[in-house]
Each structure stands twice: as C-alpha cells, then as structure tokens.
Image: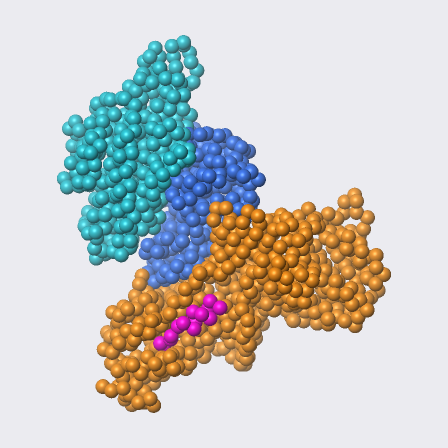
Amino acid sequence: MIRAATTPHPRLGVVKLASCDGCQLTLLNLEDELLAIAERLDIVEFPEATSHRSNGPYDVVLVEGSVSTPEQLEQIHEVRREAKLLVTIGACATAGGIQALRNFADHDAFRAAVYAHPEYIESLATAQPVADYVKVDAELRGCPINAAQLVELVTALLTGRRPNLPDEAVCAACKRAGRVCVMVAQGIPCLGPVTMTGCGALCPGYSRGCYGCFGPREQANVSSLSRQFISLGRSPQEAGRLFAGFTGYAEPYRDAIVELGGLPGASLAGERAHRAMGAGVNAEGKS
Amino acid sequence: MTNVTKSAIGFLPRAGFQHLIELLAEDGRTVIGPTVADGAIVYGEIHHVADLPQGIGAEQAPGHYRLVHHADERFFAYAVGPTSWKRFVFPPTLALGESRRDDHGHVSFGPAPREIPRLAFLGVRACELAALGIEDRVFLGGPYTDEDYRARRANTLIVAVQCAEPAATCFCTSMGTGPGIRSGHDIALIELDEGFIVTAGTPAGSAIVTRLDLAEATAEQLTAGADQLAAARDRIGDPVVTAGLHDRLLAKLESPRWAQIAERCLACTNCTAACPTCFCTSVSQRSDLDGHTATTERRWDSCFTKGFAAVALGGNFRPRVQDRYRQWLTHKFATWIDQFGTSGCVGCGRCITWCPVGIDVREELNVIAPPPQVSAGPAEAAQPHAPRSSVFRVEGVRRETHDTVTLALSTPDGIDWSTARGEFVMVSLPAVGAVPISISRRLPRGLELTIRAVGPTTTVLTGLERGAEVGLSAPLGHGWPVAAAQEHDVVIVGGGMGLAPLRPIVDEILAARSRYGDVHIYYGARTPSDVLYTEELAAWAARDDLEVGVTVDRADATWLGRVGVVTHLFDRARWDGTKALAFVCGPERMIQATVNALAGRGLTPDRIFISMERHMECGVGLCGHCQVGPFFVCKDGPVFSLAQLGDVFGREGI
Amino acid sequence: MTTESATFERSFHVEGITRVEGEGTLHLTVHDGQVSDARLKIFEAPRYFEQLVVGRAPDEVIDITARICGICPVAYQISAAGAFESIFEVQIDPQVRALRRLLYAGEYIESHALHVYLLHAPDFLGYASAIDLAKDHRAVVEQGLALKKVGNALMALLGGRSVHPVSLRVGGFYHVPRRAELEALRPALANALTQAQATLDLVAQFQAPPFERPVRFVSLKHPAEYPLFDGRIVSNDGIDVGIGEWRAAFREEQHEGTNALHARTLSGETYQLGPSARVTNAADQLHPIAREALARIGLQEEIARNPFWSIAARALEILHYCAEALEIIDAYLPPAAPFAPWTPRAGAAGWGSEAPRGILWHHYETDEQGLVRSAQIVPPTSQNQGQIEADLRAFAPAVLSLEHGEATRRLEQLVRSYDPCISCATHFLDLTVEGA
C-alpha cells in the first residue's frame, strides 16, 4: 500500500542491480512530467541522472534489476534498511528478468561457456527477483515498465492513494482497445491470457502475440494455454520458449518451461561447457 | 426506376447501396459497419461500399476464426465478428466526472465533458438487435439509469441486415433472438445476390428509405429472402434447450463440471468483452501530481478478474476461477432473468469463437444442466438518474478506536437528509477514491459515517479534520425494515464495524420506544480497544428498556466484561424468538454463526435481516460487481431477509 | 586500491561513475606526474546474453538482445536482424528499409538528446545534473526534453514503445504504420529540427577542456548514406573490411578486474567509435542541413581531435536525423507486405550497425531450423574502452594541478564524452572464438 509520505518533499532514490537501465530510462522519458516530479520529490540518488549521491535514508526507493552478484545481495539489504518504501520496477526486479533464465542451467557451466576466464567473474549462481531477498512494498511490472503506470505510481505516492494498477489479463486491455485476438483470428500464440496487463496490449496491436513481459497474472492458467499452443501446431519446445522470456523465472511460467522441455540453450550451454572445461574445472563446479 | 408506394416492399439494387451510405452521412451520421481489419470483420467507419467486406466471410469454430473468400459479391455474407455494437453505445472507457480538491480541503464535483456522436449502425443482425434490447433494460430499465447510454442510444440509427450466413458457433435460434429480424431496427435489409429487400421500421428509418431509388421487390425476391432465412435457421438448428434452463442451471450450483471448466478457462475476460450484453464496469480516478484535479473514469471490467469481487482487507468472495465462471454462466442464463426479465444471452456465439481455448457455452450448458419448462418474466419501470456527488462538510470528528472515526457531515446547501431512505452513501474524495459507507446516524441536516481505515481511501477519510469537504451520493440501497418490527421484540446483533449500520435502528426505536416490544442489543468486537460507541453502549445499557450485551474475542487487563463470540451473549437468554425480528450485521462468518443461533431460538428466515458486504463500485446496480445470485447487493440490498436470499446465503464462491 | 603509498602518488577513484548508463568505476593512479595506471572498470553484473540466445529462434533473439541495453534497443534489434537476414539471404523491401532508418533515427534523437542535455551538458555548465541545471536554465532542459520526446514518439509509433520496441522481425516489421500516422508526427519533427539547430548553437558555445590527440576513428561507411546499418567497416587510417568481417580487423580480449571485454585492432591498438568517428569519416554524407550547420559552427577539426567535442558531433547527428526523418516520412509509401518471408537454414554471418555510441556488431551461427548455435556480440563501449583509458592517461597530467574534486570531475567528464553504455559492455567472448 502506498501512503503519503510525511515530509513535504519525499526523498527518492533510484537504484540499479543487474539490468539494462531501460526502466530507469522510463523515468527520464517522462518528458512532460520529469521536472514537475523533480520539484515535488528530492531525487537524492539516481546515478544515471545525477552526480549527487546518497546512501539513504529514502522515503521511496525504486529498484531496477535482479540480484545476481554477491555485491548486489549486500546492496539490496542495505537499500531495504534505508528505505521506508521499496518499489521494484521492471521484469528484472520483479521476476528476475531475462538473465534469470540462467537459473534453469548449471551456472558454473554457463559462465565457463561464455567467459574465457570465468575466474575473473563475480556472479551468484542465480539471478533472483528482489522480493526473494527483502520485503517489497509495491511493484511495477514490465520489460520495460510502462510510463503511464510509473506516473500513476508517483502520483499515488504524492497524493496518498492506492496506485491504480489492475491485475487483469492483457486480453482485458486488448479488447477494450478493440483489437482482434491474434490467437483466434491468426493462430499466433499469445501469452496475453495469462499475462498481467499494463502495456496497453501492445503486441497484439502490432500483429504479434504477447511475449509476457509483464509476467504472470493472478491464477494464470498456463497449462490450458500451453495445450492450446500445441493444438495450434506448435511443438512443446516452441511453446516452452514462448514462456521463457523476460519473466520466465516467475511462477507459473517457470513450471511451464520445465514441463514443456526446458530451455534448449541452457542444456546446450552445459554440454558445451563441460566439453570445453575438462575434468579439472568440473571438479570445483557446483552441484 | 420510381419510388415505390408506401405499402409495397422496396428493392435496392446492389449498385444503389452507396447511395444509402451517402444518405446516412447526409443525415449527419458517422456510419459504422463491417470492414476487414487484422484478419477479421470488425465494425469501423464506413465511407464507401469499398470499405465493406464484399465477397468475404469468416469460418468460425470454438476458439477459431479465419476470413474466407466467397464467390459472390455480397457485402454481408458473414456471421458476427469480434466487435459488438455495445462498444459504441457503452464505450470501453468513459470519463464520468471531474473533481477538484484544493489545499484547504474544499471539494467540487462536475461532469466530464462529453460528446455524443451521431451514428448509424450498418449491418446489425437480429441477435444484435436483441442484445441492444437487453442493454436497454439493463441501463434504462431500472430505478437508476445510465444517461450516457441513453444519449448514445438515442443518437443512433439502426440499419439491420438479416443473417444469411450463420457460423458454426451461432445459436440465436435457441435463444429466440434470430436469425429473422423482428424489431428494434430503423431500417431492415435482406441481402440477395442482386441487391437488398428494404423495409423501414421507424419514421426515422422511413425518412431515409423514401429517399432511396427503390424498385418494388418481386415475389421471387421475397421468396428468395424467406428461403434464405429458413436455410439459415436450419443450419443453426437448436443447439441449446432453453426450456427450464433457469431452474436447471441454478439447481447445479455444486456441479463438478465447474471445476473441470476451470481447468480450461483462462479467466482472460475475452468472453465478457466479446459478449454484446455483458455490462460490468469498474471506476478509477486519475489525478494530477498534486491531487488537486482528478478524472473519474469508468472502464469495462469482467466478473473473471481478480479484483472484481474483492473487498477490503484482502477478502474475495469469488477467489477461484470456477467461482467466476459459475457466476458468469449462471448470471447470463439464469439470474439475469430474475434481474431483468430476459436472458442475458442472445446466442451470437462470440464467447465461443473468441474464447482462446474454445470453451463452448452450448456444450457446457448441456453438460451442467441437461434438458427440459419455460421461464421468463415481465420487467420494470424507468425512473431517475444515477446520483452525482453533493458536497458535504465535516462538522465533527469523533475518534472511536485507533483506526476508526465517526465523521459528522452536513450539507452546506441545507437539504434535509433525515428522512432520506437508503442504507449507505458513496463517499468520494477527488484524486483519492470513492467508497461505500453505511450511514451510522441520521441528523436533521446531515448524517454520521463511522469509517475504519482499511485501505488508502478510508485512511485518508479517517484523517479528515473539521471543515474538510467530501462528496456524498444520495443515500442508496434498501435499509433495515425497522417499521416492520413495531409490535415485535427486536434482536440486534452486531460484530465489529457492523454496529455502525445498526445504530440508526436503535435511534429509530428509541425515538418511539413504546411501539416496540423487548429490545436486545448484542455486540462483539475483536478486542476492548476495538469497541465502537463505548459511551452510547454504556448509555443504552443504563436504560431499563434495553438489554445490552458486549463481548470481545480477546480481552486485556482492563476488560471486565464477557469474552467469546457474540452468540454466547444470548446462549442462555430467556426470550422467545418466535415473536422477534432480528437485524444482524458484521463479518460474513459472524453473520452465519449468528443466523444459525437465531434459527435455533425460533426465528424464521423471513424475520432475520442481514446486511451483506460485497465489492461495490457504482452503488446503483449498473457496474455488476456486487452481484449475489439474482441480486445486486447495492440496489436490492444491502439488507436482505434470509428468506429473500434463499440458498444463495452462505454459499462458497458466489 | 585507494591507498596512497608514496608522497608523489595520487589516486583518482570514482566508485560508480554517474550520468552514464550502467555501473562502472574509474581508477587512475598518478606517480611523479605520470599516469601509472588508468582503468575504467565495469562492474555491471554479467548477464550472459551470448549464451541466453543459444537454441533460440531468430525473432526471439531480436527481442532478447534488445534487453542488453535499454538506451539503444533498436541498435541491438537492427544488428541482430541484419545478421539473420544475411544468413537467410532475405531481401528487404526499400520502404521497410526506410522505416528501419526512421525507427533508428528516433533512437538517435532520443539517445543523443538524453546525453547532450541530461548527462553531458551539466559538465560543461557546472551542474550535478540536468535537474539542477533546470533550476537556473529551465528552458534549456525543456528544449532537450522536447527533442527527446520527439525521438521517443517516432520509436513509439514504429515500435509500440521507445524502450524495447516490439515491431522488428527478421525480414521487416510485424506491423507498419499508415501514411497518415507518420504524417501526424511531421509538425513535431519540424519543430525538433529547429530545436536541433538551437542545440547545436548552444553546445558550440561550450568551453571544452583543452585536450588534443590523434585517434583512429572507426565507423561504418556506405556509398550513398550517412553510416547507419549497411556498408563496410572503415577507419581513417586504412582499415576497410566487409560488414560481416569485423573479426578480420579486430579482436576482443578479457581483462582481470572488469566484467567487460576490451576490443583492439588485430595489431593490439585502441580506436574510437561513435559520433565523432562518424562525423569525421562521413561528414560529406551528413544531410545538407547538418552539413551547412557544421560549416556554420566550424568545429569539424575540434571534433576530430578533442574527445570532449563529441557533444557537438551528437548535436549534429540530432539535426541530421531530424532532417532525414522528415524526408523519409514525406517519401513513405506503405510496403506491400510488412515483412519478407524467409526460410531457415544452417549458416553463419556477422553484421553491424551504428548504435548512437558506435558500431555494434553481432555474429550468429544457426542450425538447419534456424536456431542459434552460437553468438558473438561486440558492443561499442567495449570497443571504446581502450581508447577511453588511453585518453585518461593522456589527459590526466593536465588536471593534476586542479583541486582533487575538480580534477576528478574533469576525468569523469572525459569518460562521459564517450557516452559509455556499460550495460552493453557487459557480455563476453565466446569460447569458440577465442580458441579460433
């Protein structure tokens, strides 16, 4: 729940973990509101935009990215201690992001397959959503987050009401927008029925199926939808890859991926890495 | 060619169809009709016959739709597509109002600017005419009406085209709505290969038709039209046996099939969005960064969404998808009839085609409620309008508990509300939100509201200070039948916040104490610090003409009273329930326990009145959220007798 | 690393460089007035993209690689699409190609306006951020935001949204706009053109720190267009290889203490990519409006010698792409089909495009079903990194006399001149490549 902060100018921090910076950029992309927001919030930490730094305390902190290095693990606990409200923004912070697909694979093998010198690399075995480690007060979904939802969050914060972020299927927004179902009319697999809206049903509006970047909605019936994809002529692997997107690590997408045959790339990575590394490195490899 | 005489039936050659489109445009109307976009025949703007789907149809099956090309040149050789006309008379999103709140707490409410387009619907099918008729009953037939809908509907001219190419998903024949056009149109067309048989249904339609260059329809043409209709009817058959469906369906509320459907159902809301009659909405506010100005927006919602039946503190009356599917299907085919005197389904088949996993209601109905007895009923009378907020000022704030306050509110314009009936008001604060709150006392120039901070809006409301303003709707819903209790004993049982709506009953009884028999007031709260109206309770208890019992679930060191559930307060009482009326309000579980205890003391269901909690958005029976079986809790309740609720009461997931 | 072991040793350490995209650390050690160590360390968490795309279909790769960078997703999408189209030999409709340039123009306008106004200008004007700058010069920041907004609007129309657009696929687009939709953007773009001129005049008045050095500029070169996503890879000192042949002239290496790879020429030398390189290597291909503007401000030599003047090159490219975008819109006719069909096959190809920060090169190997067997992605920042460090070494002695904080700010400003995109830089060499 979002409550009005008690000070006239709440202290805002924007913090980044493993991510592409696109969600923070969405804040800078609020061209019409940015300066007005800056007049109402003290932006005390936002390294991408300002050289002023602060380790807290924060009234609100927006966290982008997933926790995927030992330093980030320390950092997120520190941020939580300093923040009254911690809001995760984007698929990485809320669901682990695309990099969380490595969680399906053997991490050491994965790392060795892509690094010439894996020993130089500091990385946790998994990339996890922030809520796996600390309490999260609110979240904005999406890869990237939606600008209108960000404005809604900030407005709710400033006016002391609940942000209006409906938990309904992409389909609901799609039909309000008058779009024709791409799955029924064109046989294109679409994650819209199991994905939370917030994007404005973007992909069906561009003649393609939703790829789930806002993550699973409440009671997402992925098994029914998977069966439908297969009856539309997709192989289980193709159906599994559709779930294995930017929120693939979120339940129940995660289960669907495993059920449909996992990630071909991940298993391949393991295989190649083992070939390449030889027994010596395997010996210190993770279980 | 000459204009045909009035009595003859006209025929418009295909080449003359453009003229019809032009006449509609000349009438100042934007013509909306079928056109091909994104792989489907949708309804969009039509400027020219070239915009129509000439020679194009669609193959439809559960969860499947594909455009197909015909050999002929017909414009309307298709069955209904994904769009329904409801989006033009009942827009998917609609700005309802604009409100302001300044730094001094002054509030104001006004309507949102609105433009009602002048439209012509081209190509409306019989099932769609029926759907518009149903929407008319929903939005215009009850005590509260949707004036936006009324204006849009009044500004629309309907050109119907009889269906000749039904889809495999159609079942209008079963629902008694088609395929033949009977009423509701301004102009009706029957498309043949060479042109259209034309008839006018209203003076407005006639005004257009008489300007067309019509030939007289030949006997062959009329026969061809009739044959075409008969063939369409035969193709559809009668897939759903509707006789007795209402009762058959409601007898199967515990069918195992609901859970089986939920394994397939995505709860994605496509069926309700595609349905030409589904009318549920939700309302939200958008504001500027400072919360000074806000717009209230209504949008299509669906009984399949998570928040639809959710209430404060995380409660949800329909938590499972099977609950939601059951609500939808039983409403559409059964309780809709109780509410509006007609089925909510017209048999257009959209929910079948556009279900991404192809759930077929025809099949489900036949499985859940296999056949046969006819049911239907008459309807309603129309009256005033949906209420708009009036500004009320906070005259006093009394803190009841750590999270609950009672606000005394008065209207600056001096309207006397003391006699206004109704059980609750919608309280709105610009840029914050609107919530239904029970009236906890009627005052000569206002009322009292007891509000507990359970969410952001109530948190702001409980923080208001003297002088602040809020918006209040007129009192809504049906309240307690206190007058019926005259000459009877009265048992009042409240749990937690449930005492607030019961307080006006006590006020009313005490104002004419001699007219009532014995009066028993039982109240249970979670802890001593959650007890409302402590001084009043003490004052009531001090009277010798009231019995007052108070209990708490968990005591503390200061508590000297009873501990335990509220029903324990009258476990050993000696009064005779057969002479009493009971008024019960509190959490649903407490109500259930109380009702059982009261029944055990001889109170019959017609003498037990309860107030139901449900998710309310509009307060006037137009948004659909608060439905319980055949009832809208806001409009038909929130106070019901147990007899009225029947087996709906206490059922899980309803 | 921050200890000062000798009286004559000084360290400049910036833990978390601000106003750059991603997380990096600057460390410089000066001993007796000589820079003994200069390192731009990249601490961005590794995300293993080259492995994540293995086993994926080409259209999925377009969406996945976009997530390497939220600032230049179009660059990733175009580079990936180009590589696959090269493998599958897909012919792109000229109107589709024009739309891709238009989409990319949107990204340039947005990214460059962001950098010029929100990230880099505060350095020149002495502010900690554009938000602070706006307190004194609101109109300046508003002008930058207005330009950014036009770039975003172009991307949103063509791609659905400006960050991680959804419209690009192998062979073209999922969906192309109607002419009227593009024309609706014309007034805003025409206004942006004026604002871009004003931007150029504004930055031309900035004082760049005096610092000149010869540098190897690498960019794409196309016979008929300002370099964007076609042509050859060239340098101002004679490198000239096919767009798929990046490995014939350059290589990547991994260094300890950083999560990014460095790229060098095969002979081990550093080079610079980005706006200064393009403006220097292809000045004659700028839109006439931009060419004329360059003549007016007369900074061509400075751009070629002084990295701080990249801000002028960026402003020039904003102007160029506003002008080009208007021309594309005026000439637009919707293509017969939004995309050309293609048949998967086994193969391998490299392809590059000019991200706002410089060449972004992708190489993919596919199996018979068209699924990715291996990938190499070389982003611009890992290529610029060596040159950034070289510049830091060369520039540091000039700021040693300044107060420590001021000197550090100057060094940071130098790093920012490259518009480093650190999220991009964080990905890694494929084992098979190093072994080759």
Chain in blue (letter): A
Which shade of the palette goes to chain B? orange
Answer above or below: position of C62 versus B30: above
Q: Is residue B379 left or right of residue B349?
A: right
Report if residue C22 lies within the magenta region.
no
The magenta span reads B147-160
Residue in front for this viewpoint, B286 or B192 = B286
Residue A18, x across and y down, in percent? 42, 36
* Farthest-out residue, left: C223
Q: Is residue B41 left or right of residue C342?
A: right
Report if residue B150 lies within the magenta region.
yes
Occupied quadrant, residue C25: top left
**Can residue B249 be seen in the rendering of this structure?**
no
Residue in front for this viewpoint, B572 or C189 = C189
Chain in cyan (letter): C
**Can residue C117 be seen in the rendering of this structure?**
yes
